[in-house]
Amino acid sequence: MGLKQLEDVTYFRLNNEINRPVNGQIMLHKDKEALDAFFKENVVPNSMVFDSILDKIDYLIKNNYIETGFIKKYRPEFFVELYQFIKEQNFQFKSFMAAYKFYNQYALKTNDGEYYLENMEDRVFFNAVYFADGDEAIATDIANEIIHQRYQPATPSFLNAGRARRGELVSCFLIQVTDDMNSIGRSINSALQLSRIGGGVGITLSNLREAGAPIKGYEGAASGVVPVMKLFEDSFSYSNQLGQRQGAGVVYLNVFHPDIIAFLSTKKENADEKVRVKTLSLGVVVPDKFYELARKNEDMYLFSPYSVEREYGVAFNYIDITEKYDELVANPNIRKTKIKARDLETEISKLQQESGYPYVVNIDTANRANPVDGKIIMSNLCSEILQVQEPSLINDAQEFLKMGTDISCNLGSTNVVNMMTSPDFGRSIRAMVRALTFVTDNSHIKAVPTIDHGNSLAHTFGLGAMGLHSYLAQQLIEYGSEESIEFTSIYFMLMNYWTLVESNNIARERGVTFHNFEKSDYSNGTYFDKYTSGQFVPKSERVKELFKDIFIPTAADWAELRDKVQADGLYHQNRLAVAPNGSISYINDVSASIHPITQRIEERQEKKIGKIYYPAAGLSTETIPYYTSAYDMDMRRVIDVYAAATEHVDQGLSLTLFMRSDIPTGLYEWKKENKQTTRDPSLGISRTFSFLCLVCSVRSERTSIRFWTISSPTFKVPWRPRCGSIRSRTFMRG
């Protein structure tokens, strides 16, 4: 029959019946019926069947579906053994959405799109043998983690592993632009190339001179950042990945840049079409000084990047505004503009309510917690990547006189629900580190040399988590409660510990450490001070019970690890980051990332198919009270949970604040009425609370924040998670 000739299927109708209560009861069993019907009517009749895994491999190689190089690294007998092991785990999808997502977006199909060539076991098999790079023991460990859904590679890795005609294994990149035409031109080409290979791109424009600044001594010659933003937007629109989807990018600007108001205005609904950016995302880099000035309701000065660079000899990005602010104000050689700090704060809040932008990166908080040498200047599309960068110097021939370092984002995620039942938590994490290390070592983005150079020096990855709310609800723990905060802290402490252990093991094996390891807090041992105090152990009886079968490192264990790291180093500069993880959370049948769910029965529009309903994992009469929607939740509780995690995360966390147009009465003490207006202080207060929590709390060190707001019953905002599977997300008023 073939996938393109499907007729009279029942699974969409059965799934939709979830949303039609009968006698006041949610028909959750209809999702299982839809799942069964999907396999009966779609998967089974349209899957190519092979006698053995070896026959399948031969067929896929002969028809150029998979690469041959990684296959030749193993014994044929091992393939039989590994595939049998995977089959014996009896994997089953738990929801219709999970199966539909996998087969629609991840399973390998014939060239004509008529038949499936893979099931979940096959995809796990190829991921394991590809990432293990010929090591049979590691391949078995990786397969064990993925098939039990304790580990989920990010979409580009999971999708492309082993395939002959594939994209890159990573799909998110960070590049910086310096204040010269050569850099601008080179960066536009980089954006084109990265978008072509499926990448989302983060770009910082803070170094560019403002509109009206002099060029070669001629006053008023510079056009500012907005025209450059338009160039980048056009680049992403043109380089659209074979027409499959638009390219995606975000541009960041420091709030002390003179073009900040014009920058924000490009996203206003009534913006002039000459300056309006429709598909480009916006982010702001916020030093602590801005919060101080806004809190005191004082004037703030915006500083010309051109005059700052001339005066200090370094690009604007690399100036500590908080430290140098008074000095910059007093310096007559620095061109400056005065505005009210609180007026800018109001503009940011208004725009976030109107469009969901800008993203916010608390840059000083990130740099204070940064354990490695260098300066963090920006983030990525989802605002969880916080790594150091160095600028490049480019001549008129577009050649690098000095090769800087830019960033590629290599991610994966643990599944909290399944990790808590792992027979060996530490072994699970160590297997994940091995898989992610392979991706890092084998990602060479030659088209953008600064990214390739940065990756070769840093060997970074970002292991995160998903399913936190699912786990808490299934354990009858309220999200945002003290128990949930304590659990989150211990969970991420364990991730930190075991990634450090394995990174140290790899450094010892290879005799290689990341660049400038000797200048890091790992090398001098200060990074471990808070852990050798012995404070990070379960304290409440409930949390003790949850971790009773899991090894918890003591102060002595941390001290031993510190000594090993000081002796042999770490292979990876960065190891942890919490991404939004969109479609991969559906495949794993858990809540996305570590934020709360938005709906108990989530409604999704799937292209031409129509609506698909996804019940929260483990939803039952018993767990319903613990599945509070994010829109009905005090955002300070979400921030507290993130603060508990971020103390142990060496990069960032993509934090979304959810606001309704009608806020439940009594949710926020400063709200005298439930209706939210464009001048409502809720966003600004929440953002300030987040900043203060992340600066002052003993639980927190860093985070970056994305803000999505609701101003109408249905509000659509551009949203491209790192996994690259979702082009937009529709947030429904709760």
Image: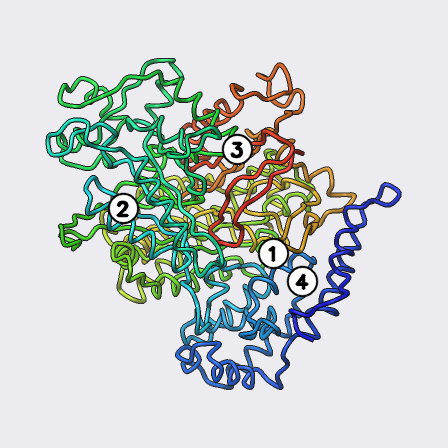
Q: The disc labelled 4 sits on which kind of residue?
A: Phe
Residue drawn 13% across the image and 50% down it: 395
Graded by Cα atoms within 10 Å as few (under 14), some (14 to 19) or many (20 or more), the crowding at tag 3 reads: many
Graded by Cα atoms within 10 Å as few (under 14), some (14 to 19) or many (20 or more), the crowding at tag 4 reads: some
Q: CA gap, disc 2 to disc 3? A: 29 Å
Q: Which residue, given by chain and number where applicable, does mark 4 sit on? A: 93
Q: Which residue, given by chain and number where applicable, does mark 1 sit on? A: 418
Graded by Cα atoms within 10 Å as few (under 14), some (14 to 19) or many (20 or more), the crowding at tag 2 reads: many
Q: Which residue, given by chain and number where applicable, does mark 3 sit on? A: 640
Mark 1 or mark 3: which comes first in sequence?
Answer: 1
Q: Are marks 4 and 3 in contact (CB under 8 Å)?
A: no
Graded by Cα atoms within 10 Å as few (under 14), some (14 to 19) or many (20 or more), the crowding at tag 1 reads: some
Q: Which residue, given by chain and number where applicable, does mark 2 sit on? A: 389
Residue drawn 37% across the image and 47% down it: 234
Q: CA gap, disc 1 to disc 3? A: 23 Å
Q: The disc labelled 1 sits on which kind of residue?
A: Asn
Of badges 4 and 1, nearer the viewer stands 4
Q: CA gap, disc 2 to disc 1? A: 35 Å
Q: Using the image, determine if residue 290 lies above or below residue 374.
A: above
